[in-house]
Image (cartoon, helix red, strand yellow):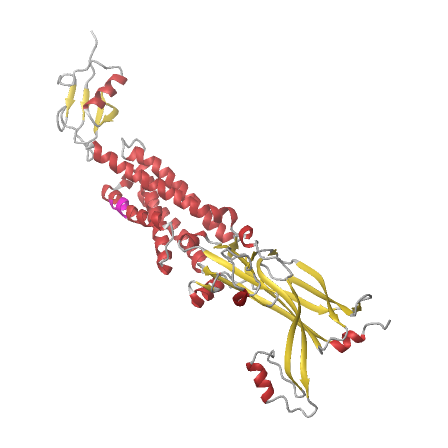
Amino acid sequence: MSIRPWVVVEAPDGRGLRRVTIGGETVGSAWSLRELRKTLDRLGYPDVDVEDPASVCWRGGGSGTWPARAWRRRVTSVLMMLGLVASAVLNVMIGWPDASGALTFTQRITGALFVLSGLVQAAAAVSVIDYWGKRQARISGAIVLLGVLISLGTDSLLFLMWFEEREYTPYMLAFMPLLCWSLWALLLLVREKSWKGLPQPRKFAAGVFVSALLTALSLTYSTMYQPAVAPMRFQLKAEFGTARADRERPFVQVPLKLSVKNTGEVSVYIVINDFTVYGRTAKYSERGTLVTEQWKKSFETGETREEAELHVDQLEYTAISSGRFYEAGEVLGSGQEDARVHVFEIPRNVRYDLLHVDLQITYMRKDRGRIDVREFGKPHPSWIKGSPYSCHPSLCGETLTYHGRVRHNNNLVNVTRKPRYVTAEWSPTRSPEYSISSSYDFKSGEAAGGPAEETREVDRFGVSTVYASSEVSLAELLGSIPSS
């Protein structure tokens, strides 16, 4: 005759779970009578009569007392898991571009922290199964609490950064609902005291606080501080070489020597650049009376470059030759030096007295942002009808337009702002132009946000222009040509 086990079913705990012991040893817990029978069957006692007091001792309620509210528990666990998974995906999406491709070490660390926090939240999502289950792991509640705290911190940061500009971004549909979810989840976990299973809850709390503080400092540094160190330095040269007479035509070939060197510590994107050679004409006076009224008149009509001489006035500059040193979107690395010789021709009997050259390069710092070079490097002619970049010649002349997405090096800024675009225009008949804004009207040639937004974005991305120029007397230039 076999001896039946002495089964004790304890009173329901706060969640309705009842602990089961056999012979004084805990063998599990059960949410329902059906689950109790499965436990006994698994242990080799399939024929136990649960209604027999000699076999089963019920404490705190009989075989019909199962206040588990399974549907409520399951709904709560599903909501908790979905929130943690969504937050983990969001954090990894935000952090991975910086962790894998940011230029500065601090930005890479920031991206790695977001990826790591996403992994912690994924572990917390797995721990939800145990914490809203039978809680076999003592630390599952603390892990879930840590994941929720991470979500609350990152979603709050995203909301504050978004609130600074209050621009629509698709990520709003993620971090704003997650912020509300994290507040609900935190209140629920605090009410249940999910950290109670930890052997040393104070050390856990101290570790969470220190980690949060270091993370907050890192994020604040990388998102709010734009480094003023590593100033940009360039060496630009534009010089005229020795002229040579054309053997077949009455023209003179003049070499123009151009060189550019990035002597700073930061690589840059070339937004737009231009070199233009001008021929100057003027009116001369031996008495020196032209420097007064005529100078002011020529300035008002745009014929002068804010120059004045006692015996020379009515300065006019005519563009002779124009071109570009770099293609739009090219990268000029730190320490890189490039040189080029451009040869242009002028008639022997030309009426110019001086030749003047301007070289200008507009750049964007690579430690401030990234340009989509594939998109931006493609020129769009203004004279092709039907194109979004087309423009009537009376308004734009004949212009090449470059347009592409520009991203901040900190992806936190990208997900809380509307997309920004860099636009540049080059024409041989006028000075190059550029703009950075959320959108650009190619018909009017204006940024949607106006000058204020454009100025702000230009400063944020570290866009600036450097210049070089030189002049040569045409008499000196022609005098150096050997007579035939």
Residue 90 appears at what percent x and percent y? Answer: 39, 45
Examine the rendered structure and indicate whether residue 456 appears above or below residue 350: above
Q: Quadrant of the N terminus?
A: top left
Residue 391 visible to the viewer: yes
Q: In screen coordinates, is 418 left or right of 306?
A: left
Residue 51 appears at what percent x and percent y? Answer: 13, 18
Q: Quadrant of the C terminus?
A: bottom right
Which of 481/34 is in front? 481
Residue farthest to the right, as pictured:
484
Residue farthest to the top, as pictured:
1
Examine the rendered structure and indicate whether residue 274 appears above or below residue 43: below
Residue farthest to the bottom, as pictured:
287
Q: In screen coordinates, is 324 left or right of 396?
A: right
Which of 441/198 is in front? 441
Is residue 82 located in the magenta-colored stretch of the structure? no
Q: Residue at x 31, y 48 (%)?
A: 177
Q: In screen coordinates, is 116 left or right of 35?
A: right
Q: Main secondary structure of the magenta part?
A: helix
Highlighted magenta segment, given as a residue range: 183-187
Residue 239 appears at what percent x and percent y? Answer: 71, 69
Answer with the quarter of the image where residue 44 lies. Answer: top left
Q: In screen coordinates, is 391 left or right of 308?
A: left
Examine the rendered structure and indicate whether residue 229 appears above or below residue 68: below
Which of 21/402 is in front? 402
Residue 138 visible to the viewer: no
Residue farthest to the front, as pictured:
385
How many numbered discs? 0
Answer with the quarter of the image where residue 199 lies. Answer: top left
Q: Residue at x 66, y 91 (%)?
A: 288
Residue 218 appears at what percent x and percent y? Answer: 44, 54
